Image (cartoon, helix red, strand yellow):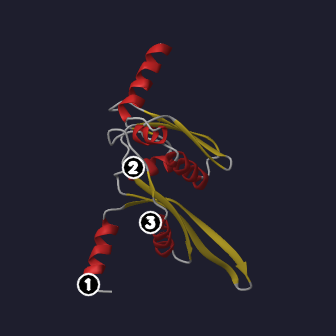
Amino acid sequence: MSANEINNNDERDSEFIDRLVFINRVSTVVKGGRRFSFAALVVVGDQKGHVGFGHGKAREVPEAIKKATDAAKTSLVKVPLKEGRTLHHDIEGRHGAGKVVLRTAPPGTGIIAGGPMRAVFEVLGIQDVVAKSIGSSNPYNMVRATVKALAKINSPRQVAARRGKKVNEVISQRISDSKVSV
């Protein structure tokens, strides 16, 4: 690998922000006593609509975090953002017993969410969102449910392409539907 390729990889890695969500100390009982290892859950994003999470296990905490960060970078998901600050529509996500409800919010609301979900939104680049976790408070399930929900979000452009219409036709339908229901 040339020095130029190494610099490109460093630049690509440096654009990502990582957040440590959870560390778990696990002990194994062996003949000589207990042997400790650590499991880390890390969320990685570029604050421009890409997010991923990873899990890593090792004997030392920094090594577990590094493994989790590498795993998170390989599992990135692209999320379309409305005006670069919030979600296009409300959505629910589920993983195991963990269920999360994500709602759009007006400008200035901020991130109203619990710990693991807050980390996902911060690295994703969302500025205004309201989220609620229902069921499991396990950080692994909360992060997985949040990422699953985010992966299901559709932008008006995606909906228009799927229906074979223009974007303004889809948006005008949505506006006229909301006026009728009022």
The residue that label 2 is drawn on is 122
The residue that label 3 is drawn on is 73
Q: Give 89 or 58, whichever is nearer the viewer.
A: 89
Q: Earlier in the sequence, mark 3 or mark 2?
A: 3
Task: Specify the quadrant that holds the N terminus.
Answer: bottom left
Separation (CA) of disc 2 from disc 1: 32 Å
Mark 1 crowd level (few <14, some 14–19, many ≥20, 10 Å Cα):
few
The residue that label 1 is drawn on is 3
**Would you say 181 lies left or right of 175 here?**
right
Indicate the quadrant where residue 50 lies.
bottom left
**Which residue type does callout 2 highlight?**
Glu
**Which residue type does callout 1 highlight?**
Ala
Separation (CA) of disc 3 from disc 2: 16 Å
Q: Residue at position x 38%, y 35% from top? A: 166
Q: Earlier in the sequence, mark 1 or mark 3?
A: 1
* x and y, in percent, of residue 33 in the image: 70, 81
Separation (CA) of disc 1 from disc 3: 22 Å
